[in-house]
Amino acid sequence: MKSEQDMTGHMDKNKITGRIWLCFLIAVIAIGVFFYLRQLSMGLSITGMNQNITWGLYISQFTFLVGIAASAVMLILPYYLHNYKVFGRITLLGEFLAVSAVIMSVTFVLVDLGQPGRAFNMILHPSPKSILFWDMVVLSGYLLINLVIGWVVIESERQGVASPAWVKPLIYLSIPWAISIHTVTAFIYAGLPGRTFWLTAVMAPRFLASAFASGPALLVLLCLILRRFTSFDAGKEPLQTLAKIIAYALATSIFFVLVEIFTAFYSGIPSHKEHFQYLFTGLEGHTTLVPWMWASTVLAFAALILLIIPAARKNEKWLTAACIAVFISLWIEKGLGLVIPGFIPSPIGRIGTYIPTGPEIAITLGVWAAGFLVLTLFYRLFVSVRAQSSSAVQRTE
Amino acid sequence: MVDINRRLLLKAAGISAFGTIFPSVGYLISAHAQEVISKNTAPSAKRWAMLMDISKCPAGCRDCIDACHGIHNVPLINEPGQEIRWIQKVPFSNAFPSQENPYSDISLKKREPVIMCNHCSNPPCVRVCPTQATFKRKDGIVMMDYHRCIGCRFCIAACPYGARSMNFRNPRPYIGSINPDFPTRTKGVVEKCNFCEERLAVGLPPACVAACRHKALIFGDLLAGESEIRTILRNNNAFRRRPELGTEPHVFYTG
């Protein structure tokens, strides 16, 4: 038993850490805003994008983060469809993570626009044939659904009453909707003629598999952070279940990539092989992404081994390492490793190079910081409501 | 055959009736263009197309490129990867990657076909554009509305021909002498070849065709049975870039 003094000392230290964290996020956002204002006046020329590689870091982050958003379904589905009770403690964390991730995704699309002032043209002149139009529809819908669910559930918890009945169908709707956001995002890539790297029916399943690994990995890390710095402890069991989900999803994701590699190399069609050669060995001396892709590969396999071996998975230090490895590995694979090789070689055989610039990286970090600020505020609310309701439970007991 | 002709006639009648009521609908680029279009006396085509005889195109000649880029205020940015191009010459194997073979005549490999927007019948750029900033006219010309474009570059990802360029920066400082008869662009929008629709509107051939001293570029209406381009296509084996993609490109090559 810790003495009361220790407890308050502990609390104060966490309060200070929390303040430093918020100040840090705000500083990173401010730097991002500064460079975004420069981008507004100078155009996208301040980025590393060029006529050969016209999508870069921004769209990579968008693609990866839609997956993080979709992964909330890995909590909702077992809890609401299979009545898996232990996830009840953390489904709200998944929903709030989804909300923050969607906000980041949409922001990345906005900062990527050459004429952001005209963004409303997507609504004023909608084009139902464009997958980007449907992505806007499903992403904004998903944001709204999760905001409403999160808000209603936490408000009911705060008041110590059961959630209203009408929120249940909304939660069920969020399950296929989560699948739809990542499927539609995959279709942005998968439906383009002449971009052979993306022109594959396995693109959407690949997106979902990697999302169901990277999202829960981030959630495990967030739960461990919450345990370390707040009064909320998710407990061992939900984290272990998440770890198993990550293991299966990661194995599926690796399998899908290997399937793609088989098709490309066994068929021997140059236009299918070249993209993978660019990624893993370099093409005509262009090797920008090679070290990144090998890092991603090594991390993925290392994480898979750690997550498969029960002793390693049950050790929270190894579990943390595995989750960090999964997150970084898939951030590379589903980010730059997916977007850039689609443009290389270009339709007229040019092998361009893309290296993000400093301002581009600063803007990217700014958007991430904004997402984490939203997430921090949501999780603070969550922790305080949980602390309240658990003390209420103690009082009634 | 009769049926097709009758349908075309009806269509043509419909289009011209529509054209009489709204002479400038959709094609407004500037007040000036509107003025030109309203004076339009040029016969309207049913399906514009370009044909290039690669064998007639001498190495090193840039007449068509200079003419096009000159009148359309295409900026000259000399940094690798930043160039804006409406029309360009590339090595044969870059234009036709799957047509290459190791035993072909060395003169073929040395050739540099002129490539531009193919004004596809089934254009992927139009399909993916989320704001309809790029659209296809009834006469086959794929247009860009520079005031509608949000700069998402989805059309560039979708185009299998590398025919589109993004204005990553303000293009105006890079224009040698501005042609006041054609609009300049702003930063953050995509641009490309427009088959000189502003010249067609006043009965002139595209600038590249007019500038070519070697008669390597032929332009005309595919649906006018006796047009030059139709006659050449009838009597020669012509090929197109990446026809297997189903986009139906309307720039043809011979030679």
Image (cartoon, rainbow, N blue to C red):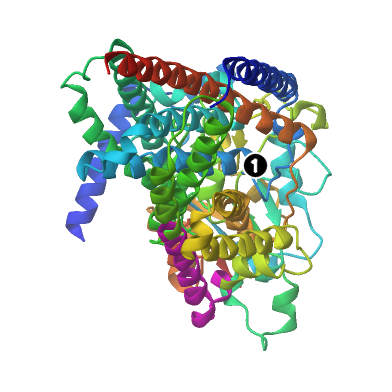
The residue shown at (53%, 51%) is B159
Is residue A310 shown above or below B40?
Answer: below
Residue nearer the viewer, A217 or A353:
A217
Judge by depth and name the residue closer to the eye, A135 or A367.
A367
Q: Position of residue A98 (x, y in %)?
A: 43, 33
Q: Residue flagged by tag 1: what amino acid is it?
A: Leu
Q: Residue at x 61, y 64 (%)?
A: A297
Question: Residue drawn at (38%, 57%), measured in percent from left and top?
Answer: A205
Q: Position of residue A196 (x, y in %)?
A: 51, 63
Seen in the image, is A88 located left or right of residue A133?
Answer: left
Work out whether residue A294 can be spotted.
yes
Residue numbers of the magenta segment: A248-272
In the rendered structure, does residue A251 fall within the stretch colored magenta? yes
Residue furthest top in the image: A159
Q: Nearer the viewer, residue A385 or B147?
A: A385
Task: State the image coordinates of residue A9 (x, y, percent, origin top left).
Answer: 65, 17
Query: Is residue A256 part of the magenta span, yes or no?
Result: yes
Instruction: Tell me the residue at 47%/27% (across/down).
Output: A232
Where's the C terminus of chain A, which quadrant?
top left
Residue furthest to the bottom in view is: B103
Task: Point out residue A101 in the picture as x, y percentages from the top left corner.
Answer: 49, 32
Label 1 CA crowd tier, 10 Å (few <14, some 14–19, many 20+)? many
Chain label for disc 1: A
* Viewer can see residue B200: no
